[in-house]
Image (cartoon, helix red, strand yellow):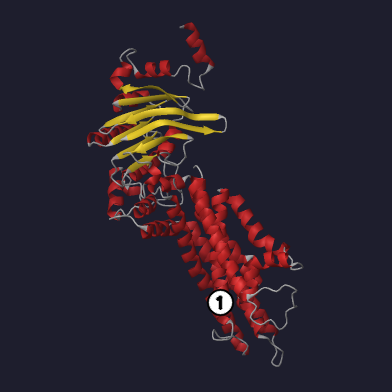
């Protein structure tokens, strides 16, 4: 049988799921994010009195909270980093590249598996959190159904935030090859950088809106009636484009750098 | 067949491998010798395309290793038994390697049995002794049933039974017509196992030939090696120098 690309996918899939640490991180983090978001929904539920003004955005805000998104970012970026760092730091990558000298194919397969698994994980946590928080709020008749305007966009934007952050983590792992350094870099790029950018000038606003975290925030603002107007507002299309841009740039960088460097 | 031609690798000002040329033929075990830091491991990594040469070429059956789409069916290699992830079981590690090369999983159990790791196959590699990791690395090298095999210090950490087993395995692989390149510091092992020898020092070729040719004058491989590498060793002790002065 001639080895093909799907054999590389199968190999990377086997490697991904045979690491106990990754399975633990994914399992525990789902519970942590659900707990954070449900706590917020429970707070809204307890504070709501019939007749209070209530915007759908208030319900959306509990479906996936900022803290929940911070957690999602940290977990997925770390898992992406683990996929590449675990090979570099242990020397396993030498074994891998002796088995498959076509390095670009190996890295592409890694990125594909990370994208697939993290999209599934993102969908699971995003859908589950939406369903559970809104089911809780339904006790006050303020919960949203998945057919509510913007609900699908909300769930999709949260789900796809996961693979984007994971691919950035994978890329940083290839560049830095060291666990702690990669996590620090991931926090700086994905977590700190977005909060340092302002939208005072057109170009700084463009940089700000292009950050994955800010793109997620914009895409999950379904109802903007209570938002302060920005001089250089983001757009839905550009926010999706930011997701795609980061994912592609991270993958291409990882593939090219791993292909060129000595081991 | 492995052909190394004018191979050179420089890291900044240090030259790890210096215009090195030699040929490794099939049907024999070729021993690869040199003092610490002579460039043996770098040469193996250059042959396997892990490092890019500054100049020169290294080919396997006339082709550079990087140009092959998959490696395991062409070349089996054990470079460092530590090049594994301690969190996986031995079986998962081999299974991932096998899948990448479209090798059926039944072959994984076969090589596990061949190296004597069937009982430990589902344990985490992190719990393995060095000898067990060497066996796992050898299993990985055998996985694709390749015509060319490279082993870098495969005897480290093996018990006497394991040493004897590897010796027999290498002889068997060569007898089957495969090309076997064995790097080791253990002179007595080389005398037992190798047919041909390639000796390098400071990245340069010092001698190449059959075991009989190289040991004809001094009578022992160890003495031949020490004579050949007297000027090329970086790590000779003061005692060695004094002994040399007295001679």
- Left or right, B187 with respect to A127, comes to left
The x and y percentages for residue A239 are: 61, 71
| A233 left or right of A122 in image | right
Number of dots carrying numbers = 1
Q: Which residue is drawn at 64% across and 65% down?
A: A211
| Circle 1 Cα neighbour tier, 10 Å, few/some/many (<14 / 14–19 / ≥20) | many
Question: Which quadrant: the C terminus of chain B?
Answer: top left
Task: Depth check: give the residue in front, B228 or B18.
Answer: B18
Q: Reply above or below: B146 against B96.
A: above
Q: Is residue A150 above or below residue B97?
A: below
Q: In which quarter of the image is residue A196?
A: bottom right
Farthest residue, direction top: B246
Image: A236 above or below B155: below
Q: In which quarter of the image is the N terminus of chain B?
A: top left
- Residue at image x 54%, y 54%? A253
**Picture coordinates of residue B134, whole percent (x, y):** 38, 39
Q: Looking at this rendering, what residue extends furthest in the bottom direction?
A: A51
Quadrant of residue B62 in the image? top left
Choose between B85 and A175: the one closer to the eye: A175
Percent across and percent down for residue A129 are: 56, 76
- Residue at 61% in and 90% down: A141
The answer to whether residue B165 is visible is: no
The extreme left residue here reads: B176
Q: Tell me if residue A27 can be seen.
A: yes
Q: Name the residue under label 1.
A: A155
Residue B212, quarter of the rendered image = top left
Q: Nearer the viewer, residue A124 or A210?
A: A210
């Amino acid at each position: 049988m001639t080895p093909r690309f799907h054999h590389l996918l199968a190999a990377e899939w086997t490697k991904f799921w045979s690491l106990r640490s990754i399975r633990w991180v994914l399992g525990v983090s789902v519970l942590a994010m659900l707990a954070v978001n449900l706590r917020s929904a429970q707070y809204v539920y307890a504070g709501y009195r019939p007749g209070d003004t209530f915007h759908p955005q208030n319900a959306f805000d509990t479906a996936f909270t900022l803290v929940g998104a911070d957690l999602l970012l940290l977990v997925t970026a770390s898992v992406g980093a683990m996929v590449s760092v675990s090979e570099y730091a242990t020397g396993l990558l030498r074994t891998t590249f002796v088995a498959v000298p076509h390095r670009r194919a190996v890295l592409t397969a890694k990125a594909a598996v990370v994208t697939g698994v993290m999209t599934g994980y993102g969908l699971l946590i995003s859908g589950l959190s939406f369903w559970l928080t809104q089911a809780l709020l339904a006790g006050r008749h303020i919960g949203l159904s998945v057919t509510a305007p913007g609900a699908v966009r909300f769930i999709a934007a949260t789900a796809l935030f996961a693979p984007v952050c994971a691919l950035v983590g994978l890329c940083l792992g290839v560049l830095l090859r060291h666990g702690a350094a990669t996590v620090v870099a991931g926090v700086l790029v994905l977590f700190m950088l977005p909060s340092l950018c302002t939208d005072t000038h057109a170009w700084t606003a463009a940089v700000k809106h292009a950050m994955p975290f800010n793109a997620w925030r914009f895409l999950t603002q379904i109802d903007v009636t209570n938002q302060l107007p920005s001089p250089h507002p983001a757009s839905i299309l550009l926010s999706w484009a930011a997701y795609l841009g980061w994912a592609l740039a991270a993958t291409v960088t990882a593939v090219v750098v791993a292909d060129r460097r000595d081991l | 067949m492995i052909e190394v031609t004018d191979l050179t690798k420089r890291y900044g000002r240090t030259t790890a491998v210096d215009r090195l040329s030699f040929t490794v033929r099939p049907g024999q075990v070729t021993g690869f010798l040199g003092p610490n830091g002579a460039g043996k491991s770098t040469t193996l990594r250059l042959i396997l395309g892990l490092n890019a040469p500054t100049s020169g070429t290294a080919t396997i059956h006339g082709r550079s290793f990087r140009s092959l789409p998959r490696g395991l069916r062409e070349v089996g290699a054990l470079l460092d038994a530590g090049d594994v992830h301690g969190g996986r079981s031995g079986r998962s590690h081999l299974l991932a390697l096998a899948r990448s090369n479209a090798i059926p999983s039944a072959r994984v159990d076969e090589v596990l049995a061949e190296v004597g790791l069937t009982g430990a196959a589902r344990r985490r590699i992190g719990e393995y002794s060095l000898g067990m990791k060497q066996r796992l690395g050898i299993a990985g090298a055998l996985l694709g049933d390749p015509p060319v095999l490279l082993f870098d210090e495969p005897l480290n950490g093996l018990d006497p039974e394991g040493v004897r087993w590897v010796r027999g395995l290498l002889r068997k692989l060569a007898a089957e017509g495969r090309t076997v390149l064995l790097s080791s510091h253990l002179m007595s092992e080389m005398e037992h196992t190798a047919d041909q020898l390639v000796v390098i020092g400071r990245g340069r070729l010092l001698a190449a030939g059959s075991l009989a040719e190289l040991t004809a004058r001094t009578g022992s491989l160890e003495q031949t090696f020490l004579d050949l590498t007297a000027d090329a060793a970086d790590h000779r002790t003061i005692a060695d120098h004094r002994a040399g002065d007295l001679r």
